[in-house]
Structures are given as structure tokens and as C-alpha cells.
Amino acid sequence: MYGISIFLSEEITDETRTYIQEMSNIGFKGIFTSLHIPEDDATLYAKRLKELGQIAQKLDMKLMVDISGEALKRAGFSFERLDEILTLGVTGLRMDYAISNQAIAEASQYLTIGLNASTISAEDVEELQTFNADFTNFEAWHNYYPRPETGLSSQFFNEKNQWLKQSGFRIFAFVPGNQQLRGPLQEGLPTLEKHRYDNPFSAALDLNENYQVDGIYVGDPKISKRTIRQFEAYSRDQILQLEVADIGSNYYSKILGEHKNRQDDARDVIRSADARFNKIVTVEPEVLLERKTGSVTIDNHLYGRYMGEIQITKNDLPANKKINIAAQIVTDDISLLKLIKAGRVFNLIEKGTL
């Protein structure tokens, strides 16, 4: 499932409501927010949480709230009266490390509980079992990391997720936004450091396909309209949409459209499975250029029977007089290339289409 983040430090405006509705329309099912609040803003945060809960209920979206025990009290709630927070539309609480396992176990009898995925241990699991926690209500939530260079490594993330899966947890993590970034740093809110400046759509697919992540939330307040359309298209037909820039080749129009990566996935290039078998006029050699990462190429007649084959380079490759560069994948979509594995269908569309 996919979700978004809405922060209570900002007023819930009509623009915010429209964004939530738009994301719900394309299949996003969750909202994440935080109740870590300054003391003098407690009443305001409680009011905004109520507004957000009403929106979530109306759109049938889950609402996960990051809390500490003190913040809950300042907002006028408590662990002894969880029914009050449930009536607001809150469906889950992500627990701060300072909350005891006994309190967590008791709360799990009433609603979904998000545990800290990075810090939960086998000892915690045993203790929660001792307190008769309802493990069907547990989820393991990774943090997001506002400061560059502090996001998780892929190795740690993968190893931790393997243990979490073996322990029966559903796993949740964050990808950055690319339209409105959360301050004060405005450097993205990813779980994995390698995703910090990536297209949120490609980061989300990476989490889902390579790291056993069940729920993926955009950590920052907004993603761009373009990225929204990429999510929408993929949820509709499971086809990746990549925009390409025209660089002046006579064969630009020949590379546009739907492609499928060959089953024998090459190391250096994505090979369109059937392109060279399509009818095509003789492809004449063009300007000799280095094949930068994301170059969309078409083989010319100097390559003999390979003439007409369409490829996308996964990394920088030298110029080849037998290969023309017909287009260039736009910068925002370069990170999608690593996700085009054997047999994956993708669509090359003109820049500005999304």
C-alpha cells in the first residue's frame, strides 16, 4: 500500500484537502502524521488532528499518528482513553521509544501499533508476548531521516527486514517527496539514504520489489503532479512510464512507445525484446556520440542483422559507429532504469507528456 504524510505544524488548507483527495483517487490508502508537539501548540494540534481524522474517515484512509506519551497527554488524550482517539479517525499509533512494552501491549488490544523497525529486538518481542500483546495489530515502521548522510544503508535495511519478516511483521518505510519538502533542511525524508534525491516513484518501487516493504509512505508533504501521474499509470496497468528528450535524431519517433526488456537481462543495457524485428527503413549512421547513462539508442545498418535494435544504457558506454543515439531519458527518470529487469514492460513517451 501507499500513503502520504501530512504535518500538523501547518494548517490543513483547501490545497491540502485537494492533495489528499487526489492521492486517494490514485489508490493511496494511508496518511501519516506526528503528534510530537510544542507545549504551547497542544490545543491547535488536537484541532488539526481532528480535522485530519475527518478527512481520513471520509476517504476511507488509514491514519497513523507518531506519538510519545507526553505528547498524547498534552493534546488531551491518554493510553487509558484510547477510544477517544479512535473516534477521531485515528487507526494506528507509531510508538516512541520511551513508551513501555506493557503500555504498547495494552494499546495493541484496541488499534494498530507501529513499532520502531530499526530498534525492535527479539527481547522486545518476547516481552510483548509476555504482556499478551495482539501481534495481529503490530506493524514495523522505519524512520525517515531529514539530515543528509544519516539515512539507512541498504545492507542494514535488508538484513533488518529479513528478521522482521521472519518474526511476522508487516514493514513500512518512507520515500522522499519532490514538490514540497519539509523544513527546516528541505533535503527529503527518505528511509534509505540512497533514495534521498531519487524520483519518489522509483524509490517506492525499489522498496516494494527489493526490500520486502509492505507499506510505502511519502515522507515529505508533497510529490509533483508528474510523479502522481507515474504512480497512477503504474497502478492502472503495471507499465513504467519514462519520458525521453528529443536530441535531434532522425529516428526519434521510432523509439517511442511500449517496449519489453528481454528475458536474458543484459548487464550494461536494456534491450527492447522485439524492436529489431519490426519493419523499419534502413537506419543510417548519425553523429558519433558517447552513450551516457539513459541514452536511448538504435543500431544502424553497420550492425548488420541487429539494425533497428533499441536499447537504453544502464551506465556510461563509449561511442560506437554502429549505434545511433535517438533520445535521452530525462534526469527524473534515470533512477527507474535499475528497476527495468528481465521481462518488464515500459513505455517511452515524449518529454512533457506526464
Image (cartoon, rainbow, N blue to C red):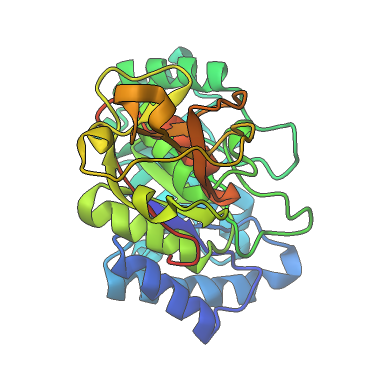
Q: Foreground residue, 19 or 99? A: 19
- 140 vs 234, left or right, is right
> Is residue 110 visible to the viewer in this orientation of the structure?
no
Q: Is residue 122 above or below residue 296?
A: above
Q: Foreground residue, 282 or 63? A: 282
For the C terminus, the image quarter is: bottom left
The residue under the point 54% across, 16% down is: 155
Q: Residue furthest right?
A: 184
- Numbered circles on residues, count: 0
The residue under the point 67% across, 61% down is: 37
Quarter of the image where one finds residue 211: top left
> Is residue 243 visible to the viewer in this orientation of the structure?
yes
The residue under the point 62% across, 47% down is: 189
Q: Residue furthest bottom?
A: 14
Quarter of the image where one finds residue 145: top right
The residue under the point 35% across, 50% down is: 254
Q: Picture coordinates of residue 228 (x, y %)?
A: 42, 62
Q: Foreground residue, 352 or 332? A: 352
Q: Is residue 124 above or below residue 291?
A: above
Q: Is residue 191 above or below residue 34?
A: above
Q: Picture coordinates of residue 97 (x, y %)?
A: 59, 34
Q: Picture coordinates of residue 93 (x, y %)?
A: 44, 49
Q: Picture coordinates of residue 53 (x, y %)?
A: 40, 70
